Image (spheres, rainbow, N blue to C red):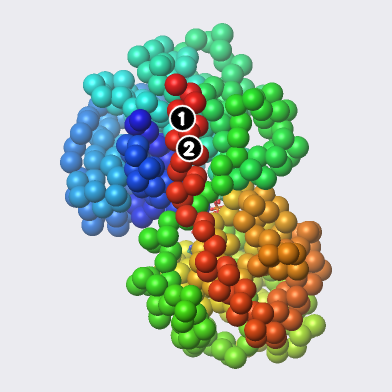
Amino acid sequence: MEILHVSAECYPAAKVGGLGDVAGALPKYQREAGAIAKVVMPAYSTPFREKHTFDLVHQGGLWVGHEWYHFNIWKESTNALGFDLYQVDIPGLLDTKGVYGYPNDTERFLGFQIAVLDWLNEWQHQPDVIHCHDHHTGMIPFLVKYGYKYARLQHIATVLTIHNAQYQGQFGWDKLYLIPSFDLWKSGILDWNGAINPLAAAIKSAWRVNTVSPSYMEELFGNANGLEALLNMERHKATGILNGIDDEVWNPAADEMIEARFAVKDVTKGKKANKLRLCETFSLNPDLPLFVFIGRLVGDKGADLLPEVIGRSLAEHPGGLNFLVLGSGDAHTEWMLQQAKQYAGANFNVFIGYNETLSHQLYAGADFLLMPSRVEPCGLNQMYAMRYGTIPVVRTTGGLIDTVRDFGDEGGFGIRFFHATAGDIVHAIGRGLELYGNKTKFSKIRKTVMQLDHSWNKAAREYLNMYTSLK
Ligand SMILES: Nc1ncnc2c1ncn2[C@@H]1O[C@H](COP(=O)(O)OP(=O)(O)O[C@H]2O[C@H](CO)[C@@H](O)[C@H](O)[C@H]2O)[C@@H](O)[C@H]1O
C-alpha cells in the first residue's frame, strides 16, 4: 500500500499550526505500520530548504489561467523526516517566505495542485492513495475524477482529511478559467453557496472524507461553517479519526529544546527546573501556579477572551497565579494582550510571535494549559501539554472532548468547562488553583497525564484500514 500525502505544511520543513505536525508525523507512523507513505508539499523559501539537499526528480511547465510557470519537483536526499519528502518548486508562485496570507493564495495553491497532478500523470510509478489535507489540496479529488488531462489517474483512491472546516478556500466563479479543463457539466460539484469552494468540491469528490476526531465529525453535521447540509449528504463516507502526537519530537525525556529533561519518576524536579528558567526569562514568580496559552490568536481558539480572563482571575485571586501567552494572530487581540500587562503587572507576560523552541519550553515549564477554543477539530496542544506533565484546562468541544476527561469524573485528569465565556474560564481556573493547592492530588494527576497513550500508532492503523476498505 503506497500513500502520497499532499499538504501545504509539513513539520519541520514548514509549519504554521497543527496541519504541519500531522503531515510531518502520520507518514512516519504509517511506515512503521507497514505502508509506504510519502509527502508532497510546496517548496517555500524557508531555512529548511537552505539547510537540506535535494535531488531533482521532475521538471515541467503549467498554466494557471493565462500565466505560464516552470516547475521542479525535488526530493529531500537524506531521508531527514523518516519518509520521502517531495517539494514542488514554482518560481514566482510558491517561493515565498511564508506559507499563507498572500493576495494570490488561490493561484499559488492551484499551481501547487496542478504541478502535483501533472507530475503524477507522467510518473511511471503511481501511489494507491492520494491523501489530501484541507482546502489547499481540495481540487485534487475533483480533478482526478473530472479533469480531462488526468484520466490516467482516475483509478487512484482519493481521501480528504478536514483539519479545520472553518477554512474552505472559496473563490469567485470569475476565476473558473484558472482550473485545468474538465467536464463542464460537472461544474456544480465545484459550487457551494454561489462560489467555487475547494473544500466542498473535495468533500463531494473524494472517495472518503475524515476529520481529526470523532466528536468534531459529529459537530460538523450540525455546525460546519455553512457545509452542514453537504456533510449530512456525504455522511456515508465520512468518519472521525483522532490525531496522535509524534512522541519522538514531543518527549520530555529527550527534548533538546527544554532546560531540564525529565520522565515520570522525576517529574517534580524536572518541571520545577523548567518552570524556574521560564519564569526567569519572563520575569514571573516561580512559586505561583503558571497558566499558559499557546496558539494562533484567533476567535476560534478563544484568544480574544484571554485579556478579560487574566484581569478577572487576578481580581478574584490577587497575586495568586501567573499567566504566560505565546501566540500571534488578530492585531486587536495582540494589542489587548500587550495592554493587559498594565493591569496584570508582574503576574502576566506575553510573547507575540511564532517560536517553536519556546513552545516546548512552555509545555515543559507550565502547570496548566488553557484552551478556551470555540472550535477545536482535534487540538494537539493539550496532548503535548499532558506529555510534559501540564494539566489541560479546556472547553468541552471537538477533539478536546475525546482527549480530556475532567478530574471531577471517575478516572478523570484534566479540567473542562462548557462555555467560551470569561466567567466559565475563570471558574475553571479557580478549580485549577484548588487542585494545585492539594499537592498529593496534583502530583498524582500530573503523573497520570504524562502516561496517557496519545501516540500515532492507533490512528496510523485506522487510516490504513480506511484505505484498504476503498480497494
Ligand atoms: N506562536 C506559536 N509558537 C510556536 N508554536 C505554536 C504557536 N502557535 C501554535 N503553535 C503550535 O502549532 C500547533 C497548533 O496545533 P493545533 O492542533 O492545536 O491547532 P491548529 O488550529 O493549528 O490545527 C488544526 O489542525 C490540527 C491538526 O489536525 C487540529 O489538531 C486542530 O484542532 C485544527 O484546528 C501546535 O504544535 C502548537 O504548539
Residue at left 64%, top 79%?
442
Q: Is residue 460 above or below residue 344?
A: above
Left or right: residue 381 versus residue 250 is right
Q: Position of residue 49 (x, y in %)?
A: 27, 51
Residue at left 70%, top 79%?
435
Alpha-carbon span between mark 1 and mark 2: 6 Å
Q: Is residue 414 above or below residue 261?
A: above
Kindly indicate the quadrant of the structure image that contains residue 449. Answer: bottom right
Left or right: residue 42 versus residue 76 is right
The reply to whether the C-beta atoms of the residues labelled 1 and 2 are less than 8 Å apart is: yes
Foreground pick, 436 / 179: 436
Residue at left 71%, top 42%?
219
* Tag 1 secondary structure: helix
- Image quarter of the N terminus: top left
Instruction: Name the residue that disc number 2 marks.
Output: 463
Kindly indicate the quadrant of the structure image that contains residue 7. Answer: top left
Instruction: Name the residue that disc number 1 marks.
Output: 467
Q: Position of residue 403 (x, y in %)?
A: 62, 56
Q: Position of residue 25 (x, y in %)?
A: 40, 50
Q: Amino acid at mark 2?
A: Tyr
Foreground pick, 133 / 268: 268
